[in-house]
Image (cartoon, helix red, strand yellow):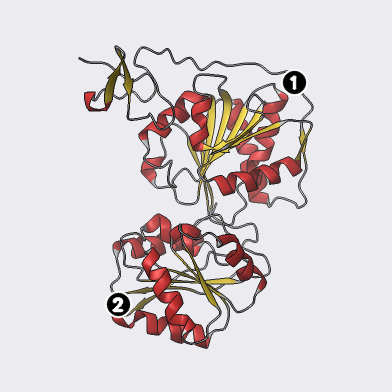
Amino acid sequence: MKVECPRCHNQNNHYLYEYLGEYYCRKCISFSRVKINDQRLTKRVKYSCQTVKYHLDFQLSSRQLEISHQLLQNYINRKNSFVWAVCGSGKTEIVFEVIQYALQQGERVCFCIPRKELVKELYQRIRTCFQNIDIGLLYGGYEEKKNAQFIICTMHQLYKFENDIGFDLVISDEVDAFPFYKNEVLEEIFSRCCLGTFIKLSATFVPKDIQNGELIIMNRRYHGVDLPVPQKILCPQWLQRWLLLIILLKKRKRWIVYVPTIQLVEDIVHFLKLFKRNVEGVSSKSFDSQTYIHHLKKSSHFILVSTTLLERGITIEDVHVIVLYSEHQVFDERTLIQIAGRVGRKPNYTTGDIYFITAHFSKEIQKCIHTIKKLNQMNV
């Protein structure tokens, strides 16, 4: 039997299951059950044109304005865009102009991000900036105004639109992050929902990511200062936590210490508390992560030990970073670039310390540093 799932195009019989004489696909069943004979018809709807406006409390940089206009022209010309914008460059605001234009034309817009917490934060930011438009919000366990012209949602929630009203413009941030990156089912759902043009945003694109669209690079943060370059420190694994302690004792600052595993979070927190350090740890098992992040923001001398949970979506003024056991396989180039991007984001604190403490200089460490230096040297 040779059949194909109408959603994810799976043809592997291993993922097909027969129930009451009909087959459905188990490869994408986590989104909803799809029968092999189902018709998947995403439709386009024209909304009434409105006078949609937005405002910002600050002025975009010359490069941000240039990219904003370029994205608008690409959309008018029905050309997809990939925006490679370094961490802290202010990439969210550069899409507001094209969003406004699309909504004024009566077209439907979606802004999607992988993680729920970032979706809620984005919703609040955009709702404050945009006027005269209803905005829908969807994430796991929550749904508001699903039929609105402008939708903000997690990428998982796109499945609710694949057999409904699709989008003329889809903007997706952090497309290189879990769970979207290399997820064939989510990528297929994304393609099905996007009936017009997409804009994909990331701080860590690689050449193979750029397909069917134009690459636009924003290699400077809005304050115009070079990205801080990590410092490599070669140290045996058994000695790394002691070197960590020396650095922390010598420089009393705000620190995020990244480690590769949850167990190491607990071990390092326990170790540092033996020396009366003001320290806490966060991981996917933590129930009070936001409380400790708040402590980090408010205290001038606080250490937060974290897994890669905090590699993205966190901005702390005057924070410094240490990556312990940075040779570990969990720290690939993309992850290390994102971690380094936590430092120097604010105009009053444009630089900071980034230490990669490692037993050997892995290829991922070398690629990370090479990429950051290359971005600093680009003249765009």
Label 2 vs label 1, nearer the camera: 2
Q: Position of residue 76 (x, y in %)?
A: 61, 26
Q: How far across and down, in percent of the image, does residue 82 sit?
A: 50, 40
Sequence-first tag of 2 and 1: 1
Type of the residue with mark 2: Gln
The percent coordinates of residue 106 (x first, y second) are 69, 21
Report whether 69 appears left or right of 20. Answer: right
Snapshot quadrant of residue 38: top left
Residue sitting at 63 percent across and 45 percent down? 120
Residue 168: x and y in percent read 58, 24
Residue at the image position 56 percent from the left and 38 percent from the top: 141
Give the vertical position of 323 relative to 272 (above or below): above
Q: Which mark is residue 237?
A: 2
Q: Is residue 209 left or right of residue 67?
A: left
What label sits on residue 49 in the rendered view? 1
> Tag 2, which secondary structure?
helix
Image quadrant holding the N terminus, namely top left
The image quarter in which residue 129 lies: top right
Q: Residue at x 38, y 58 (%)?
A: 333
- Which residue occupies the extreme front position in the image? 20
- Between 70 and 203, the one nearer to me in the picture: 203
Report the number of numbered marks. Answer: 2
Is residue 66 in view from this perspective? no
State the SS at label 1: loop
Which residue is painted at 73% across and 40% down in the image?
A: 127
- Of 73 and 120, nearer the camera is 120
Q: CA distance from mark 2 to mark 1?
A: 62 Å
Using the rendered image of the protein, determine whether residue 6 is visible from the camera's viewpoint.
yes
